[in-house]
Structure formats: C-alpha cells, structure tokens
Amino acid sequence: MDPEAVKKSLTETTVDAFALQSPCFFDTLVNDGLRIDLVEPGRVLCSYAVPPRLSGPGNYLHGGVVATLVDVVGSSAFLSAGLRTTGVSLDINVSYLDVAFIGEEIEIDAKVLRAGKTVGVVSVEVRKKGSGKLIAQGRHSKYLAVSSKL
C-alpha cells in the first residue's frame, strides 16, 4: 500500500486542468475540496462539502458528480491495495438513493472487492456524513493488466 500514490491520484494533475480540452478538467472540477480521511489496504475514505458549482437545478449535488466521485475515489482504492495501476473502466454502475444539498458534508467510502490479475472490482458508498444516510451506491469494474513489455 502506498498512501502517497493515493493522495497523488486524488490531488495532482499534470496539465492545465481548467482548460476545457484537458482530460483532467472534470476530475479537477470535482476533486477540488475533496479531503482524504482514511487510507488503508483496499479502502479509501474521503469527505466533501457539496459546493454550489456542482449543484443541479434543485440545489443538490448533480448525479454526474456522484458518478465521477465513484470513478475517482473508487480508482484510488486500487492504489491503496498495492496495485501499480488504477486500470481502465469496464463497467460503472451507480444507484441514486437520496440527494445532498449545497454545503452538506458527504463521505465517499471505496472498498476493493476483488483485485485479480486482470480485473478488479470496487464498491463505493456515498453517504451523508452526519446521519450516515446512503445517497448513492456504486460499483466499478476495471481492467487492471499492466501493459506488455514488448
């Protein structure tokens, strides 16, 4: 497990992330304000105050942002399990159960369910920090094989 690799995956970008052409634009837009609370082997727990810039028409966290959090925090859980890669998405599923409003604190809890030679699966729960009420539940499957040495 490399806690620094997890932190780097959630906080650093290598290009101007606010340039619309940048592939990191949405990750940086969402990750700004994300706090890492716990890193242990196969698990990453983060917290987040819902910012106004990411709200939908009803002043609640936009569903696309929730899906991005499932992707980004879930991917970092693979690094916490000691893998050298976060992989490439095969499948991502998010079930939306409630909403979080602007200013509300949420926590994102990602746990590796399986990390095989080629495929990994992570489960991510997004909850209201105060009550523990489940906002969304996600599952993310990724192709983990390291590129060939050819």
Image (cartoon, rainbow, N blue to C red):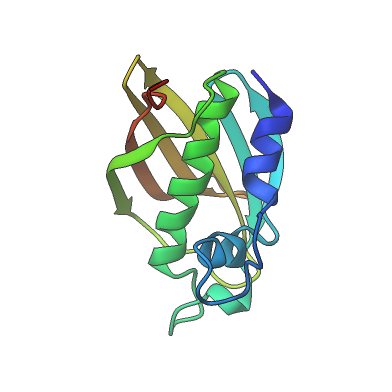
> 3 or 62: which is nearer to us?
3
Residue projecting furthest to the front: 150
Question: Which quadrant holds residue 51?
Answer: bottom right
Q: Quadrant of the N terminus?
A: top right
Residue at 50% x, 30% y is 85
Q: Is residue 88 left or right of residue 12?
A: left
- At a point 37% along the width and 44% down the height, the residue shown is 137
Residue found 45% across the figure and 41% down from its top: 125
Q: Residue at position x 43%, y 85% from top?
A: 57
- Residue situated in front as seen by the camera: 12 or 33: 12
Residue 117 on image: x %, y %: 35, 14
Q: Does any portion of residue 133 appear in the rendered image?
A: no
Which of the 4 image quarters holds residue 68? bottom left
Could you tell me residue 78's position as x and y percent?
50, 28
For the C terminus, the quadrant is top left
Residue closest to the far bottom: 57
Is the residue 59 above or below the residue 136 in the image? Answer: below
Q: How many marks?
A: 0
